[in-house]
Image: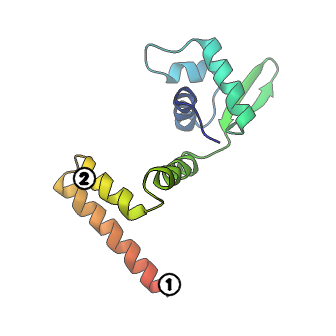
Amino acid sequence: MYLTNAEEQVMKVLWDLEKAFIRDLMNGFPDPRPAQTTVFTLLKRMIDKGFVGFRQYGNSREYYPLVSKHDYFSREITGIIKDFFNNSTSQFASFFADETDMTKEELEELRQIVEKKIAHKKAKK
């Protein structure tokens, strides 16, 4: 199950804060901030989807993510690779390298990451 763009915006604030009451969440948005009623509606949907949990303190709720940012985006990227790149990570990597404006230094860093991953896989054999 995926988040809508609006839900992702709420999650990004919640991931940054780790846990938050509604006023903390509202303060985490850049201007112009969404309406508080909108955020409440999004939170309810995200609770129903299993992305957000809460603790009740009297009339107040403290919200917290049930899914880590890493796990969510890992699943998103895997879905993109499957849906748009014929489940080929090499096609995705080629597209990424071609279509982003990476500097020479960033490309070198990416190469080092790939080389470390190759060495790690070889060591496992």
Judging depth in this view, the residue of 87 and 53 nearest the camera is: 87
Residue 42 lies in quadrant: top right
Q: Is residue 89 left or right of residue 94?
A: right
User: Extreme bottom residue here?
Assistant: 125
Foreground residue among 59 and 102 = 102
> Is residue 53 visible in this depiction of the protein?
no
Residue drawn at (44%, 50%), measured in percent from left and top? 84
Q: Position of residue 54 (x, y in %)?
A: 74, 32
For residue 77, above or below residue 117: above
Residue 103: x and y, percent? 19, 51
Q: Which mark is residue 37?
A: none
Residue indicated by mark 2: 98
Q: Amino acid at mark 2?
A: Asp
Given the image, on which type of amino acid does mark 1 rest? Lys
Residue at 19%, 57% in the rendered image: 105
The residues tagged by marks 1 and 2 sit, at their Cα atoms, a distance apart of 31 Å
Secondary structure type for disc 1: helix
User: Mark 1 or 2 closer to N-term?
Assistant: 2
Q: In the structure shown, which secondary structural element does the residue marked by tag 2 occupy? A: helix
**In the displayed structure, does residue 5 sit left or right of residue 49?**
left
Quadrant housing residue 114? bottom left
Residue found at the far right of this picture? 58
Q: Which residue is mark 1?
A: 124
The reply to whether callout 1 and callout 2 are in contact (CB within 8 Å) is: no
**Residue 93, percent from left and from top:** 35, 59
Around disc 1, counting alpha carbons within 10 Å, would you say few (fewer than 14), some (14 to 19), or many (20 or more)? few
In-front residue for pair 92/8:
92
Q: Tell me: residue 96, above or below residue 18.
A: below
Q: Quadrant of residue 58?
A: top right
* Residue furthest left in the image: 104
* Quadrant assignment for the N terminus: top right
